[in-house]
Image: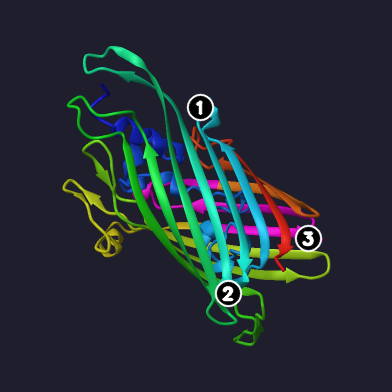
Amino acid sequence: MLRKNLIPKAIVVMLMLGFGAKDALAQAGGAAVPFLLIAPNSRSSAMGDAGTGIADDLNAIFWNPGGLAFQYDRQVSLSFSKWLPQFNADLFYSYAAYGQYVEELEGYVAANFILMNLGQFTRTSVDGRILGTFRSNEFSLGLTYATQLGNDFGFGTQFRYIQSNLAEGANAQGTGSGTGISVGFDLGILWAPEKLDLFGVDLDDKLSLGFNLQNVGPSVTYNEESDPLPTMLRLGLGLNVVRDEFNDLILAVDVAKLLVRRDEFGADRIPKSFVTAWETGGVELSLGAEYWYEQVFALRAGYFTEPSRIGDRQYLTFGAGVRFELFQLDFSFISPVEENHPLANTMRFTLLVDWGREQ
């Protein structure tokens, strides 16, 4: 029989996301499956986790599915990251996505798979006897559709199956389960005007604004425990400040708010949590920059911060990218502001393959 309480496992999962142990529940808002909040691609990760307003490739699935409405290329994206490397833990995050434009549907269709491996744990009886070991993991499978609502507006939605395998079998009373299952959806909008003059400033095809409501769905229920999905509201801006034959410089800003509220009586259900979550105050702020030289080599940097009342995470990010024919390889690195941060020295690698528009 298993331990009666799965809370230690939940803490481990939150630690994977870089949350300190003492602030884990406060930062994640008591939500389940926080792996859904991990940036899947190295590009945006290197830009301080900013991507909602610059969702211009297949990884818009995560940042803003509305951005896929402007895409016509057939693409594959693959990402991998060893999690909490400084602890030598058996944790890793992997992501795979495929997408292409479908003429018959007048839109872009994509699918993605996320796997978070949580490592190996010891299975014990109620009297403390060791009964063996088991492995824990969480995964999701998503399907996305996006289409243009006009020349400047893109709309996209993703439907996702989610499964969290934190423990094996039932609890000490023979009831419940260490596996939680749920479904969720995202809604994204991207406004990318081709013609725009703002206060005399020419912003034609330079400015984009994004909105993304992520992970809306029923709670995940484990062994007598029920936790909400990590519903997140993201607003983003992208601005192309330099574009010529050799240089391309983009600035990005994201503001994000976790729409989860929990107190001693439990967690508020949606849509009530859309209102009550703002009582805690505080939002995440991401700032990023990307520079391309001849569309071949890229340098990126960013900064992420949040108020102390919702976690006090702060870190700098850096990265680079290179393009060669069909392939783009990106790399990112996290440099926390505080010492002994769980995400220190975390590296991500992403491969993007682009076969061009389907005929």
- Mark 2 residue element: loop
Q: Is residue 50 visible?
A: no
- Badge 1 local density, few (<14 within 10 Å), some, or many (20+)? few
**Magenta includes 321?**
no
Q: Are marks 2 and 1 in contact (CB under 8 Å)?
A: no
Residue in view at x 68 percent, y 64 percent: 73
Q: Which mark is residue 106?
A: 2
**Can you tell which of label 2 and label 3 is closer to the viewer?**
2
Q: Are marks 1 and 3 in contact (CB under 8 Å)?
A: no
**Magenta includes 299?**
yes
Residue identifier under label 1: 90
Q: Earlier in the sequence, mark 2 or mark 1?
A: 1
Q: Quadrant of residue 250?
A: bottom right
Front-most of residues 318 and 76: 76
Q: Earlier in the sequence, mark 1 or mark 3?
A: 1
- Badge 3 local density, few (<14 within 10 Å), some, or many (20+)? some
The x and y percentages for residue 24 are 36, 40
Identify the amino acid type marked 2: Glu
Range of residues picked out in magenta: 287-315
Residue identifier under label 3: 295
Give the residue furthest to the top. Answer: 129
- Mark 1 residue element: loop
